[in-house]
Amino acid sequence: MSKHTHAFQAEVQQLLHLVTHALYSNKEIFLRELVSNASDACDKLRFEALADDSKWGEDRELRLRIAFDAEARTITISDNGIGLSEEEAIAHLGTIAKSGTREFMAALDADRKKDASLIGQFGVGFYSGFIVADRITVESRRAGLPAAQGVRWSSAGTGDFEVEAIERAQRGTDVILHLREDAGEFLSRWKLAAIVGKYSDHISLPIQMRKEIWDAEKGAQTVTDEWETVNKAAALWARPKAELGEADYHAFYEQISHDSTPPLAYTHNRVEGRSEYTQLLYIPAKAPFDLWNREKRGGVKLYVKRVFIMDDAEALMPVYLRFVKGVIDSADLPLNVSRELLQESRDVKAIREGSTKRVLSMLESLAHSEDPAERAKYAAFWKDFGAVLKEGLGEDYANQERLAKLLRFASTQAEEGVSLADYVARMKEGQDAIYVLTADSLAAAQGSPQLEVFRKKGIEVLLLTDRVDEWLLSHLHEFDGKPLQSVAKGAVDLGKLADEAEKQQAEAAAEAARPLVEQLKATLAERAKDVRVTTRLVESPACLVSEEGDMSGHLARLLKQAGQ
Ligand code: ADP
Ligand code: MG
């Protein structure tokens, strides 16, 4: 049988270099990545077998195995999952299909400390084997293919890899790591079991290792032929809450998110009623690098009665909550549910609504907590995710009021953390609008001449400097019955806030300035719609305003930047 040599895709070569050099200080994660792949492969088999029972063949008990050979210096990670055909081995173990890899590599280069938490989020998991191995051999057979159509893939993790056809009696995959000189520490049952415990305890399949017994004659541990399960092998979300502690929830979070920073908050509930499901949802502490990619999902995994169905079930969460991670396990959905079906399913709609409410309650309990430490967590959340949450005001009208209460802004009185409720509580006698100013930056906002009259009268103005704020204002028109009014639009009517003397003064000034105004109008005929005398300025001689209903100057600049 002939061997073929294939070159790695250029990106893979780059990645291999980075992975093996940058992740050197956190070698052990290779096992987490390979175990997670083996577990995915079993999930995929179970899923394909729903449609075609013959995929099971003789062997219906899914499991993962980890073995090592101290003499040969190899570690083998095996699964009886879906396996790989020859074409699949070439495609999946030689290229990186996923987008985001370039960003991953840039992030690795920029900040080496983040390495360990970043790897695996990008579909680069398999290559982490080369941190400890100077050669990896993969032997596999896809479920449903005959024994003669097995495949052996082998590479030293440099420029290329070899592929050849082999006989293989079992379906599934063996990944054989030929350890580097300096990776001998992993040739230990104790060490391997400890890493499994750390990262993979909640993999819902049994992970087995050879049982060792004490041989009194030799005075040493010896390996038997028997396999024993070394992890808990139970889906964490299906276990009773009373049995679980924070450490369990945090470990599970790390396992599903590959984020080693503990989450800000989580919620675990069994929901009964019209639709029956279990939800375990987490709010991460830090934004991922690709938060702004609205196409990217994958936060919430869908299971049906403990069977993994899909990873990026976008129908389960609104887009503006794309940072939420976790698991939904439905008792009602059919096992063969497709993406299309999910979009239309009433059960899924109920799950999405229920999960959205849960996430908002988690945020509310942080934001409105009596405990300053919890409120500080909300402030940290807002810093990273606030701008994403703002998208919700236009996307999720049903929850607009709740979302509005979660908003935080800078204002003329505080540089951050001002809620609309705080603002309303500080409104002046006779003030009937919430005044806002949008600008490119806080400094630009603070220096705006449009604030002069508000400062003089001691009226607070919210300073909005996020890119999405203009958009936010086009969806949020009022709060607590008070309209939001831009100070940069139209003739700001201070209404009852202006006193009689000021009104008379303004009229007199308008009268006196009439010839000047006429002259300016004539000069600026092409460039200004109107020229008028204003009371809004205290120190500056003039300022530009937009007409009520027109886009603001700030929005016009943003659109221009975006090439529109
Ligand atoms: P990811 O797991 O994010 O897809 P990896 O680099 O970890 O990325 O794996 C790349 C691909 O290789 C997987 O998507 C899968 O198609 C294939 N693969 C890896 N390990 C196995 C395995 N044990 N069984 C079957 N396919 C596998
Ligand atoms: Mg993987």
Image (tube, grey):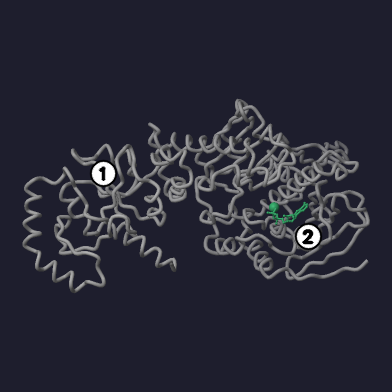
Q: Nearer the viewer, residue 398 or 110?
A: 398
Going by the numbered disc 2, the residue's amino acid type is: Ile
Q: Quadrant of residue 17?
A: bottom right
- Residue pointed to by mark 2: 136
**Which residue is depicted at the point 61% across and 49% down?**
298
Q: How crowded is mark 1: few (under 14 residues within 10 Å), some or many (20 or more)?
A: some
Circle 1: element type: loop
Q: Where is residue 376 in the image (x, y as percent from the top left)?
A: 40, 41
Circle 2: element type: strand
- Residue pointed to by mark 1: 433
358 sits to left or right of 429:
right
**Which residue is depicted at the point 84% across and 60% down?**
86
Q: Position of residue 16 (x, y in %)?
A: 68, 64
120 sits to left or right of 293:
right
Quarter of image, ligand 1: bottom right
171 sits to left or right of 502:
right
Cβ atoms at labels 1 and 2 below 8 Å apart: no
State which mark lies toward you, 1 or 2: 1
